[in-house]
Image (cartoon, rainbow, N blue to C red):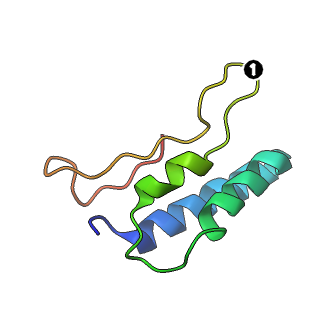
Amino acid sequence: MEGNPAVFRQISEEVIREKREKHHHLLANDLERILYGRSSTVTQPFISLVKQVPNDKERGLPLLHIKEPTEKNRGRCSIG
């Protein structure tokens, strides 16, 4: 697997903390389920999580978009 799972997890946990501080508990719970509710093996690609990502109720868009690293952005981790 490419990328840095430790950095991904650290950034994900920070996003979850921020959502809880803003009282967005349902979103934080969904993100935690996505992050922790899967196999803990690091060999599982993140792309398999796409099926579990909840959608925005108003627009029907996914609340999380996962991008695979490329040579151009290797070493960076972004959530968007």
Amino acid identity at mark 1: Glu
Against 7, is 34 above or below?
above
Left or right relative to 5: residue 50: right
Rendering coords of residue 42 (x, y %): 42, 77
Rendering coords of residue 71 (x, y %): 13, 52
Q: Quadrant of residue 29?
A: bottom right
The residue drawn where x is 44% and y is 74% is 6
Rendering coords of residue 43 (x, y %): 37, 75
Quadrant containing the N terminus in the rendered view? bottom left
* Mark 1 nearby-residue class (10 Å; few <14, some 14–19, many ≥20): few
Q: Name the residue tied to disc 1.
A: 58
Against 6, is 62 above or below?
above
Against 38, is 34 above or below?
above
Residue at the bottom extreme, as displayed: 41
Left or right relative to 71: residue 1: right
Left or right relative to 56: residue 26: right
Residue at the top extreme, as displayed: 59
Left or right relative to 76: residue 25: right
The residue drawn where x is 45% and y is 63% is 8
Foreground of the two, 65 or 18: 65
Numbered disc 1: secondary structure: loop
Q: How many marks?
A: 1
Residue at the left extreme, as displayed: 71
The residue drawn where x is 62% and y is 54% is 15
Rendering coords of residue 50 (x, y %): 51, 47
The residue drawn where x is 80% and y is 52% is 21
Q: Quadrant of residue 14?
A: bottom right
